[in-house]
Image (cartoon, rainbow, N blue to C red):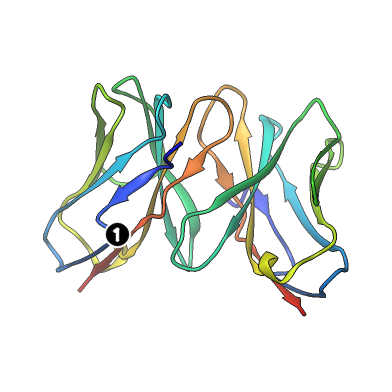
Amino acid sequence: DQQVKQNSPSLSVQEGRISILNCDYTNSMFDYFLWYKKYPAEGPTFLISISSIKDKNEDGRFTVFLNKSAKHLSLHIVPSQPGDSAVYFCAARPYGNNRLAFGKGNQVVVIP
Amino acid sequence: KAGVTQTPRYLIKTRGQQVTLSCSPISGHRSVSWYQQTPGQGLQFLFEYFSETQRNKGNFPGRFSGRQFSNSRSEMNVSTLELGDSALYLCASSRDREQFFGPGTRLTVL
């Protein structure tokens, strides 16, 4: 059962524009959410996270929004850069537990 | 600060063999988790070790096992390898709620 879902497997965006990635979850026990970026043949790189008690967290070009009532979060990257071309994973952490549940990932291609 | 390291990076085995993968966490991190990534199933949690004790376990058969040493380094073992065990095996360490991943070990079972 997929507890974390990322639809729209791929996204193409012009350099300088905004990239928006979406993620939905089903388990109400999730209280912490993370976004990772992954290049082929490498491990995921941590980008940004958000606690369920917040609705927004910002770090440089990356902003994550959480809508707890809708069980939905999104990652905004602005401005997008060619080096952002990668697969992005949404992950959710249950309360008091390090067992992360991952979405299937979104392929982002930033066009120069 | 050094990141998570995993050895070996690549491994080729045949069905029926066993394999041991190693992970060294970030200094000061006591929790080590293991994940399997395959094209079909995505990233799936295998198990987590904290202070040499298995704290969580995913839905994998008993052929998958692990351990953690007193210096927080961890190993995972897969016995009686099957073709379906071909995957990228990722180790992640954490001190708080963020997990930081190593580069992974690419295991191919022939």
Task: Tell me which corner region of the image, top left, top right, bottom left or bottom right, holds residue A104.
Answer: bottom right
Tell me which corner region of the image, top left, top right, bottom left or bottom right, holds residue B92.
top left
In this rendering, the answer to whether B58 lies above or below A110 is above
Q: Position of residue A71 (x, y in %)?
A: 80, 42
Which residue is the extreme one toward the front? B1
Counting labels gives: 1
Residue type at numbered disc 1:
Arg
For the point 15% across and 56% down, which residue is it? B80
Q: Is residue B95 left or right of residue B33?
A: right
Task: Find residue B18 and report its horizontal and vertical position in percent.
Answer: 14, 54
- Position of A76 with respect to B97 (left or right) is right
A81 and A3: which is toward the camera:
A81
* B107 sits to left or right of A95: left
According to the picture, the residue beneath numbered tag 1 turns out to be: B9
Please say if A97 is above or below B79.
Answer: above
**Quick one: which residue is furthest to the left in this view?**
B17
For label 1, the crowd category at 10 Å Cα-Cα, with few meaning under 14, some 14 to 19 and many 20 or more, is some
Picture residue at 61% right of the left edge, 35% below the top: A93
Q: Dividing the image into 4 quarters, which one contains the C terminus of chain A? A: bottom right
Foreground: B15 or B13? B13
What x and y, as percent, mark residue A57? Answer: 81, 37
| Residue B64, horizontal then vertical, whole percent | 26, 45
The answer to whether B98 is drawn above or below residue B61 in the figure is above
Q: The numbered mark 1 sits on a residue in which chain?
A: B
Of A61 and B96, the residue lying toward us: A61
Which residue lies at the image location 53% right of the left edge and 27% below the top edge? A97
In the rendered view, tell whether residue A72 sits above or below residue B49.
Answer: below
The residue at the point 41 percent across, 37 percent down is: B33
Q: Quadrant of residue A89?
A: bottom right
Element type where label 1 sits in the image: loop
